[in-house]
């Protein structure tokens, strides 16, 4: 098949693992790490990791390279790109369409992805600040405090140009985050329109329950109607499909999309198709170091399998395996 074009967010994650309850107005001991993040960027990195890259990553046309790197060259021109293929998988390449600021964080985030084998179709906005997320863990919950920054500046024309140039047989994977914020929504909608016009298959990740509620389930489902695949976690499924078992929620969502997957973390995942078929897969029992990005890794494993011909059961199993690999290390990206 062709390339996988991933559209969405690229941010800096500030991971704070606090030792005990946070003590407002005073000090709380914590282990703090800084790394690349963003749902779309994480999924792209794990997709590139799903098999060994066969050639060096490419970069987007007509924009500066990170310091010390060669000038960017055209990513897509209607031919199969010369970017990071997935060996043995049949995928021609994985590319990220996102936006960062022209700042040290943005340059670091782009360089990390290129080094990971992800093709770079990333806009750099002068004067903007690269988005960042503070991730608080340590009390059994994960809370994210977000500054979308340059993510909100993703240009619909840029997105349309990249998606429209995808080789035949390519796939669009859209993080839901662009749709959930007014500033980036035109870019998310442009990606879906361009993919339809180009004849690409489409998957969408529902992103996050709280902004889904803010945007409204009915509107979100209208935006993604007739997508080939919708992925959501248990909280997002509650917002989009209402209460019920994961299998019944996934089945209800197939009135809107062709296939729906509900991710259940350590309990595995379920898949429902519009024809009434359903599948489930358990998650491997592994020691958990950090769950940040595990759902993104699951999505990548599932897509890498499904897009190259695997049946839903095998795709779920592949997703669960990559998600299990993710939770056994610190951070949202592969090593």
Image (cartoon, rainbow, N blue to C red):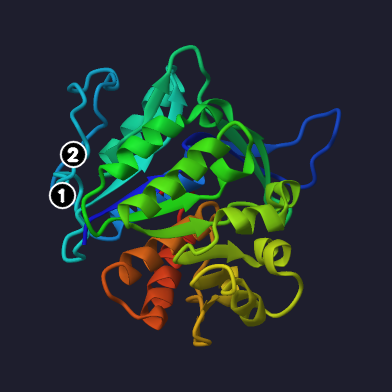
Which residue, given by chain and number where applicable, does mark 2 sit on? 77
In the rendered image, residue 130, in percent from the top left (x then y), is placed at 50, 25
Identify the residue at image location x=35%, y=81%.
Answer: 311
Residue 33 showing in the rendered view: no
Q: Nearer the viewer, residue 287 or 114?
A: 114
Q: Any mark on residue 46, and which? A: none
How far apart marks 2 and 1 lie (CA) works out to 8 Å
**What residue occupies the far right of the structure in this picture?**
25
The one of 291 and 176 positioned closer to us in this rendering = 176
Instruction: Name the side, left or right, on which 165 lies relative to 129.
Output: left
Q: Which image quarter: residue 307?
A: bottom left
Residue appearing at x 32%, y 57% in the figure: 199
Residue receiving disc 1? 80
Residue at 45% x, 33% y: name it. 156
Residue 34 drawn above or below residue 255: above
Q: Report helix, strand or loop for mark 1.
A: loop
Image coordinates for residue 232, horizontal then vertical, percent: 58, 63
Residue 119, position as x, y percentages in the image: 27, 40
Whether residue 112 is visible to the viewer of this picture, yes or no, is yes
Instruction: Compare residues 66 and 166 and report the one nearer the observer.
Output: 166
Percent position of residue 238, x then y:
72, 66
């Amino acid at each position: 098949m062709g390339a996988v074009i991933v559209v969405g967010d690229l941010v800096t994650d500030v991971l704070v693992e606090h030792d005990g309850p946070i003590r407002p107005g005073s000090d709380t001991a914590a282990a703090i790490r800084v790394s690349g993040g963003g749902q779309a960027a994480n999924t792209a990195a794990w997709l590139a990791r799903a098999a060994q890259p066969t050639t060096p990553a490419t970069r987007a046309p007509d924009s500066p390279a990170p310091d010390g790197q060669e000038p960017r060259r055209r990513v897509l021109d209607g031919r199969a790109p010369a970017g990071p293929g997935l060996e043995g998988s049949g995928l021609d390449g994985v590319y990220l369409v996102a936006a960062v600021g022209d700042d040290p964080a943005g340059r670091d985030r782009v360089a990390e992805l290129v080094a990971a084998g992800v093709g770079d179709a990333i806009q750099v906005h002068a004067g903007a600040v690269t988005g960042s997320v503070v991730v608080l863990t340590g009390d059994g919950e994960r809370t994210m405090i977000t500054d979308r920054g340059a993510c909100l500046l993703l240009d619909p024309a840029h997105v349309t140009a990249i998606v429209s140039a995808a080789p035949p047989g390519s796939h669009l994977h859209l993080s839901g985050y662009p749709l959930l914020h007014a500033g980036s929504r035109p870019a998310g909608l442009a990606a879906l329109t361009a993919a339809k016009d180009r004849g690409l298959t489409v998957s969408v990740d529902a992103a996050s329950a709280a902004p889904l509620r803010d945007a409204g389930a009915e509107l979100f489902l209208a935006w993604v109607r007739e997508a080939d695949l919708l992925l959501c976690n248990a909280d997002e499924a509650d917002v989009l499909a209402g209460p019920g078992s994961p299998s019944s929620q996934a089945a209800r969502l197939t009135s809107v999309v062709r296939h729906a997957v509900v991710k259940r973390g350590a309990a595995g995942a379920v898949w429902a198709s519009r024809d009434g078929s359903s599948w489930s897969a358990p998650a491997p029992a592994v020691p958990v170091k950090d769950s940040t990005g595990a759902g993104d890794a699951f999505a990548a494993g599932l897509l890498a399998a499904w897009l190259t011909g695997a049946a839903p059961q095998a795709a779920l199993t592949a997703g669960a395996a990559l998600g299990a690999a993710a939770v056994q290390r610190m951070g949202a990206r592969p090593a």
